[in-house]
Amino acid sequence: MSNLTPELRLAIEAGIKDALKKVEKTAGDARDEAKPDQKITGMVIDLRLELAEVDIGHDTDKAPTSSIPLLPVLGLMVKRMGVTRDAALKMLQEVMEAALTMDKDASEELLKEAGVAEAEEAIRTKVIATLPRTKVKKSVKVKGASLTVTGVAQKA
């Protein structure tokens, strides 16, 4: 298959993904019905992929994303608060349990009220924003994708 151009490879990849999403919407997730603990070898599947349109965009960049490691932050807070280990761990357990019952609005309000939202924004602007931007590869979108299985065989 060395005669596949980059554009054709992108069309095949995006077309199959789009067509399979449509199949999953109508037929459900195949993993729910497939028998577990099996290995199928030597399958040959002939497919016909039809695409009405392929739209290849351009490369862009975005601000880097970073996930603040919650548990190490909590560990450092406990260590630096000057409280005893047992009391701090008990309080940590209590607030974790309380946080699990909070809805999104209450959680956001608490973060604003306690100054955590402001601290997080400061980290974003002072640290994360100074990191190099992340390259985002060009988008590939397809319209009118359909996938038809024209034959199935299994090698002996």
Image (tube, helix red, strand yellow):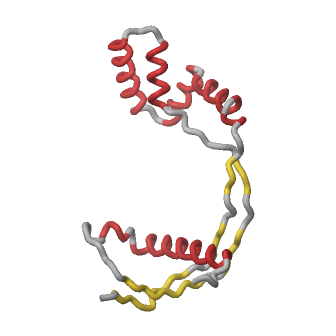
Q: Quadrant of the C terminus?
A: bottom left
Residue at (65% x, 70% y) in the render: 141
State the image quarter where residue 53 is shown: bottom right
Identify the residue shown where x is 61% and y is 29%.
Answer: 120
For the point 58% across and 85% down, the residue is 50
Q: Which quadrant holds residue 89?
A: top left
Camera-nearest residue between 101 and 140: 140
79 vs 20: above or below = above
Front residue of this view, candidates 26 and 64: 64
In this view, the residue in front, 144 or 141, is: 141
Return the residue nearer the eye: 153 or 121.
Answer: 153
Q: Position of residue 147 (x, y in %)?
A: 51, 82
**Quadrant placement of the N terminus:** bottom right
Task: Residue 151: give x, y in percent of width and height.
Answer: 42, 91
* Residue 75, percent from left and from top: 44, 22
| Image quadrant assignment for residue 118 | top right
Q: Position of residue 9 (x, y in %)?
A: 61, 76
